[in-house]
Amino acid sequence: MKLEEVIKDFKFHCKFEKNLSNKTLDAYTIDLNQFEQFKDYKNLDINEFDKHKLKDYVQSLYELDFKAKTIKRKVAVLKAFFTYLEFDEIILVSPFRKMRISIKEPTTLPKTMELKEIVKILKFLYKIKESFNDKNLYSYKAIVRDIAVIEILFSTGMRVSELCNIKLNNINLQAGIIKIKGKGDKERIIQICDNEAKKVLKEYFELFSEQIKKTKCFLINRLDKQISEQSVRLMIKKYQKISGIDKHITPHMFRHSFATLLLEEGVDVRYIQHMLGHSSISTTQIYTKVNMKQQTKILNSKHPRKGLIFVNE
């Protein structure tokens, strides 16, 4: 069997047997297509693949200057592919069993915003909102929508993809509860407790209720369609600039700030893990490395050196 043929079988397996999300399937397709195209591998018989061919391919990924994280993902997809072939007895043994691949990712700490920067953006937006006399103008409705977007990001720490995919039946405005569908279609529930945030979400719904009920999407754009991730990124970039913040801000930075600010308040990292939807605690623990404010506070107030005087006794 040719590589091209067994890859089609693997995609079928991923979609209908493993029930992977569309986003994951798209990523698998990109990575497997790249593997097929390397040295015209797609025309080779699947049994011709050995560790030497796979090493050549992995080396080519480094030569293309992919980031370590990207290479790690592409190799993981290939491992899953060859494991499937071995399990289905299409090949005798996966070539990866005879390989030792260690791809080390550089540790990059999440970029966050300070609380005062988040406050500055929200204060700026609420000030614009209060300046309107005519609440029937679309520009007023749009600013309420934009505030709702940022309030949700800051209140929940959800990913921008999760934000854009909130459906009408996923949110209970009275209770402030949102059901989030995360990576791998895993669901979690998080609550918005701040009254001001809930108030602006209710106002947003009242202003756009007809369009929301029609599309079934909670956050919509000016064309009455589901808001896009790119629209949210551009929106935040716009307000970062006009509110006078000299820092490049992304939607994901609200997620990072959500986690670090909760840590500063002494919230257990396992609760934060659940709220962020991380499968592994190790992913959440990276936020403990950026939590310098809490560390400084503890050392200033709790360290046994505090108050000890050794001169002029």
Image (spheres, grey):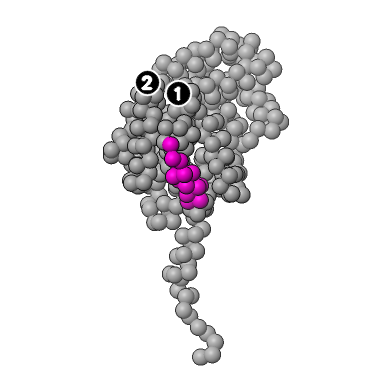
Percent position of residue 11, x then y: 49, 16
Query: From this viewpoint, is residue 278 visible?
Result: no
Q: Earlier in the sequence, mark 1 or mark 2?
A: 2
Mark 1: amino acid:
Asp
Q: How crowded is mark 2: few (under 14 residues within 10 Å), some or many (20 or more)?
A: few
Percent position of residue 110, x then y: 54, 46
Quarter of the figure that contains the N terminus = top right
Q: Which of 51 and 144 is in front in this view?
A: 144
For residue 270: magenta? no
Q: Which of 99 and 224 is in front in this view?
A: 224
Question: In the rendered view, would you say 4 is above or below 113?
Answer: above
Instruction: State the residue position of label 1.
Output: 224
Percent position of residue 245, x then y: 58, 49
- Determine the main secondary structure of the stretch shown in magenta: helix
Q: Is mark 2 on a helix, strand or loop?
A: helix
Which residue corresponds to the image point at 51% horizontal and 39% vertical from the top-left? 251
**In the picture, residue 234 is in which quadrant?**
top right
Compared across the picture, whether 202 is left or right of 60 comes to: left
Query: From this viewpoint, is residue 304 visible?
Result: yes
Residue span colored magenta: 118-134
Which residue corresponds to the image point at 60% horizontal and 41% vertical from the top-left? 104
Kindly report the distance in space between the C-alpha atoms of the residues bearing marks 1 and 2: 9 Å
Mark 2: amino acid:
Lys
Instruction: State the residue position of label 2.
Output: 214
Q: How crowded is mark 1: few (under 14 residues within 10 Å), some or many (20 or more)?
A: some
Hey, which residue is sitting farthest front in the picture?
133
Question: In the rendered view, would you say 63 is above or below 265?
Answer: above
Which residue corresponds to the image point at 47% horizontal and 75% vertical from the top-left? 306
For residue 122: magenta? yes
Q: Are the residues at dot 1 and dot 2 in contact (C-beta closer than 8 Å)? A: yes
Hey, which residue is sitting farthest left in the picture?
175
